[in-house]
Image (tube, rainbow, N blue to C red):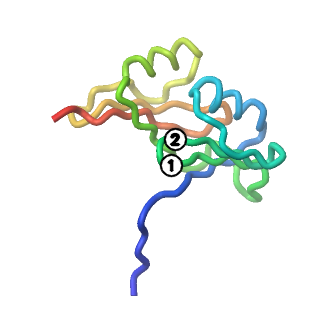
Amino acid sequence: MKPRFTGLPFFIYPVTDMARARAFYGGVLGLAETLNREDKYVEFAVGAGTIALSAVLDGCAPGTSGAVVLETRDFEGVITHLQQQGVVFLFGPADLGSCHFARILDSEGNHLGVHRTAPG
């Protein structure tokens, strides 16, 4: 029997400075904080999904894992906002034909993607 997965309930990133990470996700990205466990574990809502930040993930270092990709209908507006906030871009912004995409760093060195599916 193969496991059957039905969704992606949350993504979790390790952080070293929770105050700085909360300022980035809540302030710069404007995400709603939905859970805070003594500033050791914090969750932010993104549509039907969740990004979790943890200061207590043993053996995990920020910036050493995959990336959450955030979907937006206002790609250009979001990119302009992030540039104005001094966010580091690792790739793009780029029109890749089937989508618009950029890869950025959060306050802890983790990778994030910003994405808009091309109309059509």
Residue visible at 64% across and 24% down in the picture: 27
What SS does tag 2 mark? strand
Q: Quadrant of the N terminus?
A: bottom left
**Position of residue 78 measured from the top left corner of the image (x, y, whole percent):** 45, 21
Kindly identify the residue that appears in the image at 50 percent across and 16 percent down.
Answer: 81
Exactly how many numbered labels are in the figure?
2
Going 56% across and 52% down the picture, which residue do you hit?
A: 11
Residue 73 placement, left or right of 50: left
* Residue marked by disc 2: 46
> Is 118 positioned to the left or the right of 12 in the image?
left
Residue 13: percent from left, percent from top: 64, 48
Q: At which x and y percent is residue 57? A: 74, 56
Vertical side of 117 occupied by 48: above or below? below
Q: Position of residue 24 (x, y in %)?
A: 65, 28
Q: Residue furthest bottom?
A: 1
Front residue of this view, candidates 102 and 90: 102
Residue drawn at x 46%, y 36% is: 113
The CA distance from mark 2 to mark 1 is 5 Å
Q: Residues within 10 Å of mark 1 (few under 14, many from 20)?
A: some
Q: Are marks 2 and 1 in contact (CB under 8 Å)?
A: yes
74 or 67, nearer to the observer = 74
- Which three-letter amino acid code belongs to the residue tagged 1? Gly
Q: Which mark is residue 49?
A: 1
Where on the picture, by quarter, is residue 25?
top right
Q: Nearer the viewer, residue 48 or 116?
A: 48
Quadrant of the frame with the C terminus: top left
Classify 100 as above or below 7: above
Label 1 sits on a secondary structure element that is: strand
- In the image shown, does 72 or 57 lie closer to the viewer? 72
Instruction: Name the kind of residue labelled 2 in the image.
Output: Val
Q: Which numbered dot is residue 87?
A: none
Q: Residue furthest left?
A: 120
